[in-house]
Image (spheres, coloured by chain):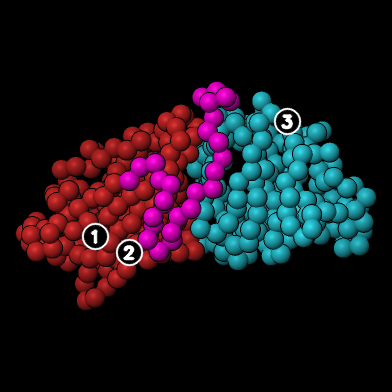
Chain colours: A cyan, B red
Amino acid sequence: MKVSDSPFPSSISFVAETGVIPEATAHYQKRLSDLRGLFLDPVALEQRIQDENDPVCYENYAFNNSQADGDVFFGTTIIYPGKVGIEYHLTRGHYHRKRDHAETYQALSGRGLVLFEREDGTTCTAELAPGKVTYVPPFWAHRSVNTGPVPLVFLWTCPVEAGHDYEALRGRGMRQVVVERGGCPCIEGRP
Amino acid sequence: MKVSDSPFPSSISFVAETGVIPEATAHYQKRLSDLRGLFLDPVALEQRIQDENDPVCYENYAFNNSQADGDVFFGTTIIYPGKVGIEYHLTRGHYHRKRDHAETYQALSGRGLVLFEREDGTTCTAELAPGKVTYVPPFWAHRSVNTGPVPLVFLWTCPVEAGHDYEALRGRGMRQVVVERGGCPCIEGRP
């Protein structure tokens, strides 16, 4: 990018309760049917798709000015509350295509967890809650989970060149799952 | 950075009203005496340094895990309310050392403005207010100004390799100033 091509500064509004960014440059929704293969209980998944007319599990707004190295983009993710069987609603989860690129999350409303894992098999979790920045370091795959009764809304900020690699997790999913046990979220190894 | 060197994920608390990050890895304060040469009215500046025992104008907390390319760091800046003569409290302002690197700001409490300028002479301003992300694009120098009666607290997120270049603005300062006229903040060209 050259000086004369650089985007102009701007102040972009977001709604903390809903995650809506009216000036977003991109937006997508993922319904339960888009997430086949990710949940522990495929029978419970199909039942909910049928009974609830394939509800939206999560959605994403982004504000992005360029694909130039060095630029930063940001957006919101909204994970609606709910469970598939005993497993809480989640995002697909991904590594960054450029594995050494980091990101930050900041919960705006609701509560949840981020599941992390590295390619050497190490796993870790961190909290998503208002008043905290959740640091997503280089080399860690990350999946977000809504463990509460209201939408989990978080703001993410990331170098544009980080990219997404969803394929590396496909087939086996992440090593840990978040399920409800006795009314409380519980982090367990994938059976 | 290698996989085995990558920092672990974490959730880092911040206090929206004060900007304090208890787990910060770095912290600094700038007093009015550190900002000599930046304000329009050097006589008013020296008077305030003397009368108020050199008050803190702004401070900064950062959370930083590494200096590796691709990593991201974040922190808070707190600009205390006040004026030097008719000019509102401000930060030094800087270009990124790597000019093509961007950043985001997000006001947590208080209100203000960011003054922007490019090396081709173009100027611009954007708002700092809760509920907005202020996008700091590549190639724009940026200085923040507290135009309100309470501390302006904002969260910043930036690629670690962006770096700071304070020298490029030194000598002439930024092309615009924010001064109080008739009780309201007013953006003017530097006299």
Relative to A143, residue B2 above or below: above
Q: Position of residue B91 (x, y in %)?
A: 27, 52
Pointers 3 and 2 within a single chain: no
Q: Specify which label sits upstream in the sequence, 1 or 2.
A: 1
Amino acid tagged 1:
His
Amino acid tagged 2:
Pro
Q: Which residue is mark 1?
A: B89
Residue A74 visible in rendering: no
Q: How many marks?
A: 3
Q: Are marks 1 and 2 in contact (CB under 8 Å)?
A: no
Q: Position of residue A160 (x, y in %)?
A: 54, 39
Q: Residue at x 23, y 50 (%)?
A: B30
- Circle 1 — which element? loop
Q: Position of residue A100 (x, y in %)?
A: 55, 29
Q: Quadrant of the C terminus of chain B?
A: bottom left
Q: Which residue is mark 2?
A: B151
Distance between mark 1 and mark 2 Cα atoms: 10 Å
Disc number placed over residue A168 in the picture, else none:
3
Distance between mark 3 and mark 2 Cα atoms: 45 Å
Relative to A121, residue B78 above or below: below
Does residue B70 appear to the left or right of A45 in the view shown?
Answer: left
Q: Position of residue A73 (x, y in %)?
A: 53, 46
Rendering quarter of residue A48:
bottom right
Disc number placed over residue B68 in the picture, else none:
none
In magenta, the rendered stretch is: B1-27
